[in-house]
Image (spheres, rainbow, N blue to C red):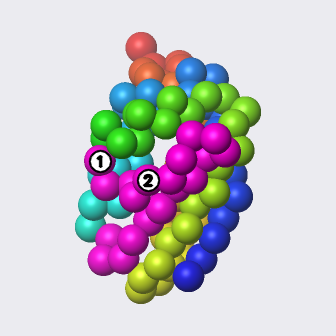
Amino acid sequence: MAIRKATIRNAHGIHCRPSAIIINECRPYAGTVMLSADGKGEITISSLLDLLSLGLQEGEPITITVDGPDDEQMADKMLELFERHFDFPPRGDA
């Protein structure tokens, strides 16, 4: 089991687009990825609606728990995604 503490960095929180990216990264994983947010509960990261229901905003601390094969690598991947500054569309693209 691997546990990571993260802070939401995206200026608009974890809204639909980042949630879809996160869910798509979790789908093929053979283990379980859990997310807990202070005062908001805990979910298994498998449903877009469940992830959106947490209403994660910039600056909020979260805990990611991964249990399964290659749990350390998956936990690191989830940490990076939750701390990413998403920009849709990417700046500088014309």
Give the magenta-colored segment's residue range: 29-47
Instruction: Give residue 57's position: percent from left, percent from top.
Output: 61, 28
Between the residue at mark 2 and the residue at mark 1, the CA separation in whole angstroms equals 9 Å
82 above or below 77?
Answer: above
Identity of the residue furthest to the bottom in this view:
69
Left of 42 or right of it: where is 16? left
Residue 59 placement (x, y as % from top left): 73, 33
Q: Residue furthest top?
A: 94
Question: What number is the disc on residue 43?
Answer: 2
* In the image, residue 74 lies in the stretch drawn in magenta: no
Is any part of residue 82 visible from this angle?
A: no
Q: Nearer the viewer, residue 89 or 51?
A: 51
Counting other residues with Cα less than 10 Å from the Cα at mark 1, is it few (<14), some (14-19), or many (20 or more)? some
Image quadrant for the C terminus? Answer: top left
Q: Please tell me which residue lies in front, 85 or 82.
A: 82
Instruction: Tell me the kind of residue under disc 1.
Output: Ser
* C-beta proximity under 8 Å, tags 2 and 1: yes
Residue visible at 42% across and 34% down? 53
Give the numbered dot on residue 92. Answer: none
Instruction: Assign the N terminus to one quadrant of the image.
Output: bottom right
Local secondary structure at mark 2: strand
The residue to which callout 1 is attached is: 47
- Give the image location of residue 93, x and y in percent: 45, 20
Q: Relative to residue 3, is residue 61 depicted above or below?
A: above
Seen at 40% across and 58% down, the residue is 44
Is residue 63 toward the left or the right of residue 71 in the image?
right
Residue 6 placement, left or right of 52: right
Report the amino acid beneath label 2: Ile
- 18 is higher (above) or lower (below) than 67: above
Circle count: 2
